[in-house]
Image (cartoon, rainbow, N blue to C red):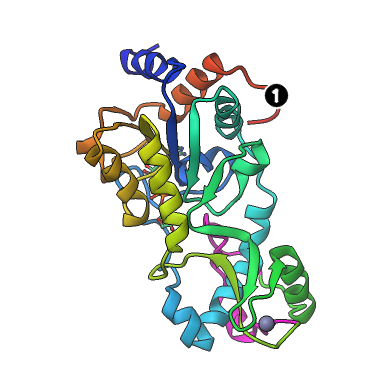
Amino acid sequence: MTPSAAQLEATLSDPGRRWVILTGAGASAASGIPTYRDRAGKWLGSEPIKHQDFIHNPHHRQRYWARSMLGWPGVRDAQPNRLHKALAAFETTGRVGLLITQNVDRLHQQAGSQQVVDLHGRLDRVRCLDCGAGYEREDIQQRLLAKNPQHPRITGVVRPDGDAEIPQSAIERLAVVDCDACGGMLMPDVVFFGGSVPKARVAQCEQAIQNADGVLVVGSSLQVFSGFRFARQAKQLGKSLIIVNEGITRADDLADLKIEQQAIAHLTEVLETISPPRSRTPAQG
Ligand code: APR
Ligand code: ZN
């Protein structure tokens, strides 16, 4: 075990310390969901949709739903990996105050984590912006497929937010679906670029950090302020900040300990040593 992995184990195994865990796309990479950025922090793939464009521009909404119709199954069918399960087992040891995830794939919940805040929402839920009605994303998927029988093929990488590259012609043909209850505009229950995380959700995360001994960042570049602010808050409060990420992050200069090489594998092994997985078949993860 490398010295930093040994230091990681010594720190996380201390039963008297409670952690807030902040995960990003790197935590779901082993589940087949690609990251938004590469190890150098460079954005991968096409321009993400912006909140205002979705709300005000029907062409942007059409583009979103056409690409999401193809990209959603990749996120829907993803399974929790060993890290998700190790984090869930770690929570059972009483060392986790809260798990904040920037991911929208709900894999932490599927792995058994109980105290989870989906900071950027969840892709498996859709809501009506006019009447607030809630829908399962899969129900909307079936309605989209029924209304758009000519399914275009995927031409590029499926992205972590369920976005997929498809021909422009397929986008222009897409008929969107509206709210069953009021005919209003449907939107996935996620925070788009330019959107804001609900204040109560941020406050819950900040409170958990106040009550914890440190923040453990896992698989995030911290490039967006939404996640970065929690790493910064930990240091402002004099708490520990550990970053386990296979790439640079925006908070590297603040970290007390940073692990990059084989980061996810090391953390998974350390967590499994501290809190043996409840049940895992070799095929999983
Ligand atoms: N395994 C583990 N980590 C990886 C892998 C891999 N195969 N590939 C890349 N990584 C690392 C990258 O180096 C990157 O630093 O995972 C990190 C993931 O960072 P991002 O892709 O930036 O994801 P995240 O930090 O979660 O992004 C935060 O930004 O785009 C918005 O709203 C979106 O929630 C997202 C937020
Ligand atoms: Zn409605």
Residue at image coords 39%, 33%: 212
Residue at image coords 49%, 39%: 98
Q: Is residue 236 above or below residue 163?
A: above
Residue 187, image x and y in percent?
59, 74
Residue 213, image x and y in percent?
36, 29
In magenta stretch: residue 176? yes
Question: Residue 52's image quarter?
Answer: bottom left
The quarter of the rendered structure image containing the C terminus is top right
Residue sitting farthest toward the left? 253
Q: Which quadrant of the frame does ligand 2 lie within?
A: bottom right
The secondary element bearing badge 1 is classed as loop
In magenta stretch: residue 187? no
Residue at the disc numbered 1: 280
Is residue 168 visible in this depiction of the protein?
no
Q: Which stretch appears magenta?
A: 153-180
Q: Is residue 222 left or right of residue 74?
A: left
Q: Is residue 30 left or right of residue 221?
A: right
Q: Is residue 176 above or below residue 86?
A: below
Q: What main secondary structure does the magenta stretch of the protein show?
A: loop
Residue 218, image x and y in percent?
42, 36
Is residue 198 visible in this depiction of the protein?
yes
Residues 106 and 202: in front is 202
Residue 27, image x and y in percent?
50, 39
